[in-house]
């Protein structure tokens, strides 16, 4: 039995087509995963906080939505350092109804000598991706 030119060509064609089908399948799977991640990202809000100075002796905490989606029903649970935060401000602003992308809210802080220099808190909110999101932050006075 002899192997001719057509058998060799057929074998090479079969190997090539199998490899290309595998590569196409792998690329399609990666594209589907990428599309899913982008869709999830579009539906997620991401809250962050920072403390900044206003003038020489006043400070504020800014809570901002740096995600793409809107955040709803935002709550704050102060775990440590809450004595520098205005309880009236917390009670009157939370739960905060909605923060769109790039929106923020400010909280009044009272800093004195010997006061805690950071706040440990948990932010909770809902968005288009999930009804219960949570982020724990340590925010320092600069």
Image (cartoon, rainbow, N blue to C red):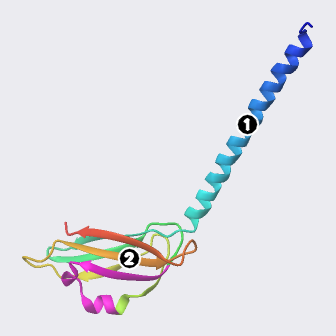
Q: Quadrant of the N terminus?
A: top right
Foreground residue, 141 or 122?
A: 122
Q: Is residue 28 above or below residue 45?
A: above
Query: Which part of the image, by quadrant, shows the C terminus?
Result: bottom left
Q: Name the quadrant containing residue 69.
A: bottom right
- Residue displayed at 38% across by 76% down: 123
Q: For the residues marked 1 and 2, what is the alpha-carbon distance in whole angstroms?
A: 45 Å
Percent from the top left, x then y, of residue 33? Answer: 63, 53
* Residue 49 x %, y %: 33, 71
Mark yes or no: residue 117 visible: yes
User: Looking at the image, do the residues carrying marks 1 and 2 touch, with CB atoms under 8 Å apart?
Assistant: no
Judge the density around disc 1: few (<14), some (14-19), many (≥20) Cα neighbours within 10 Å: few
Whichever of labels 1 and 2 marks the residue nearer the N terminus, that label is 1
Residue 12 appears left or right of 94: right
Q: Which mark is residue 22?
A: 1
Query: Which residue is farthest top?
Result: 2
Q: Residue at x 17, y 82 (%)?
A: 110
In the displayed structure, 142 sits above or below 106; it is above
Image label count: 2
Q: Residues within 10 Å of mark 2 (few under 14, many from 20)?
A: some
Q: Which residues are magenta?
A: 72-91
Q: Quadrant of residue 21?
A: top right
Q: Is residue 49 visible?
A: no
Q: Residue placed at 30% from the left, 75% from the top?
A: 121
- Tell me the tag on residue 123: 2
- Can you tell which mark lies on residue 64? none
Please identify, in this view, whether the residue under mark 1 or under mark 2 is nearer the observer: 1
Residue under the point 16% across and 71% down? 117
Q: Which one is nearer the viewer's eye here, 17 or 2? A: 2
């Amino acid at each position: 039995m002899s192997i001719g030119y057509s058998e060799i060509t057929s074998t090479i064609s079969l190997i090539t087509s199998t490899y290309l089908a595998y590569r196409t399948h792998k690329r399609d799977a990666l594209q589907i995963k990428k599309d899913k991640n982008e869709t999830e990202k579009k539906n997620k809000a991401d809250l962050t906080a920072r403390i900044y100075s206003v003038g020489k002796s006043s400070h504020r905490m800014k809570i901002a939505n740096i995600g793409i989606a809107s955040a709803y029903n935002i709550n704050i649970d102060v775990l440590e350092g809450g004595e520098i935060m205005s309880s009236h401000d917390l009670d009157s602003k939370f739960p905060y109804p909605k923060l769109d992308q790039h929106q923020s809210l400010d909280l009044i802080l009272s800093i004195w000598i010997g006061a805690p220099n950071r706040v440990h808190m948990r932010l909770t909110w809902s968005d288009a991706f999930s009804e219960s999101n949570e982020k724990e932050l340590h925010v320092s006075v600069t």
